[in-house]
Image (cartoon, rainbow, N blue to C red):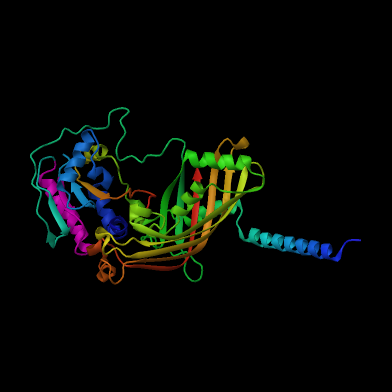
Amino acid sequence: MLRPKFILTTALICFSGLAAGAENLGESAQNPSYKELKKEWQDMRLPNVAWRNIEWKTCLLEALRASRKKNKPLILWIFIDLPIDDKRC
Amino acid sequence: MFAGAAREVVFSNPAVIKRIKTDFIPVALKAANVQNPPAGKEGEIYKELLRTRPAPQGICTMNSAGKVITWSLSFDNQESILQYLSHAKKRFANAPKGDLDAERFRRFPSVKMQDVLGNGQLLQIPKRHRKGEQCPGELRQAKGSLKGTIVGRAFDSKGHPLQSTRSQDNYIEDVLEITAKMQSELLQAARNANGRFRLPASLAREFVANAYLGMLDVNPLGGDSVRAELLSQSIEFWAETNDTTRLTISGVSKVSAKNREGIAADRGRKWTHLVDLKWHGYIDLEAEYKGVREIILSAHGNEQLKWGGPGSRVSPEAAKNPAAHLPAGRWLNISGAVGYWISANPQ
């Protein structure tokens, strides 16, 4: 015959395990799947941000060659870290 | 702050973009390379920038001989930006390949500084780098690194992402570098794990260190490089193996920082930043823990950022006329829901 204290302790452990499982199920329902997350990333990254419209060169030699060929001056954006493309300023 | 302000105010302006694309060759250069010019012929051109610059950061124009035409740190107003471009174009037409004096403006056109006279030296500029020579402007990624991209969005009270993307308080993109060492530590941990295991601290920190809105100056984990004082940090990431190649990731992070104090050079810098996130995602590994194939993560939570305000050097006039206040930018006051998404894989 099992002791009442043992039964109570076991019951408590089982119930807390079920509760934790329920919590995990609730979290799983909220957390997107791998495919859903990939799509979210694609949706959140906007293709047409204004500052990406300028195609910045990073090589002065290449830029000066283009300047001579096209007879256009350079405009240089000098600042801490790279501004081009996807990098934060 | 200059770079973020310049991108938002100058280089996101449709009229400016159109003029630059039509009449100029646009080049973006690291201020560090101007401060410490690299060796070689390209370094000689960087030295010309160093010789003439009025400040470490700015917007400069240059002719085909590598001689500076103009510098400006800010502009009287939006219209002045287009006038600056016209002015530079006119001066270029008079001296496209020769020496000329470099004009410098603290604010174009109303606050002119002393010109730097041409030094009479014309450089022999090669058409391209020699074979095997690395360009100083090239983005360098360490061998074996995974390049990742992070996107960050602010949300309105109804849970919709804000659509204005010109400013970094609403929308950011950035690049992460998942080094070979971080990957190795992850693979080791996964190999030795029996079920759930803690993600290596260096990898977890790389995720969190890029998940914030705003410019580089307000990175909560930026430390001395952004003159920050870390107030608190809590970063906890867990991985669970569902099968042998896919890890399910969960995590929480909460970081808080402000401007450091007590250093004279920092006077006028005033900001606080709190980022509180809950993370979820997946890391796909190669079979037998031979490598990392892909990382895809998202984070949601709350962010509070204040930049400027009374007692700071950020002018309250900057909101009305941001072109005139590029170096210090404008006041920022963000408080609300945010989301971040990270994707990384071998290039």
Compared to residue A71, the image places residue B79 above or below, namely: below
Q: Choose between B263 and A74: the one closer to the eye.
A: B263
Residue at left 26%, top 67%?
A: B318
The residue stretch that appears in magenta: B68-96
Q: Choose between A42 and B22: the one closer to the eye.
A: A42
Residue at left 16%, top 42%?
A: B48
Q: Is residue B299 left or right of residue B32?
A: right
Q: Is residue B125 left or right of residue A12?
A: left
Looking at this rendering, what residue extends furthest in the top direction? B131
Compared to residue B43, the image places residue B297 above or below, namely: below
Please tell me how many numbered marks the rendered image carries. 0
Q: Is residue B346 visible?
A: no
Q: Is residue B50 visible?
A: yes
Q: Is residue A84 magenta?
A: no
Compared to residue B319, the image places residue B137 above or below, namely: above
Compared to residue B116, the image places residue B164 above or below, namely: below
- Quarter holding the N terminus of chain B? bottom left
Q: Is residue A33 left or right of residue B165?
A: right
Residue B220: x and y in percent read 41, 58
Residue B66: x and y in percent read 17, 41
Residue B117: x and y in percent read 8, 46
Residue at left 63%, top 40%?
A: B192
Residue B124: x and y in percent read 16, 32
Q: Is residue B88 magenta?
A: yes
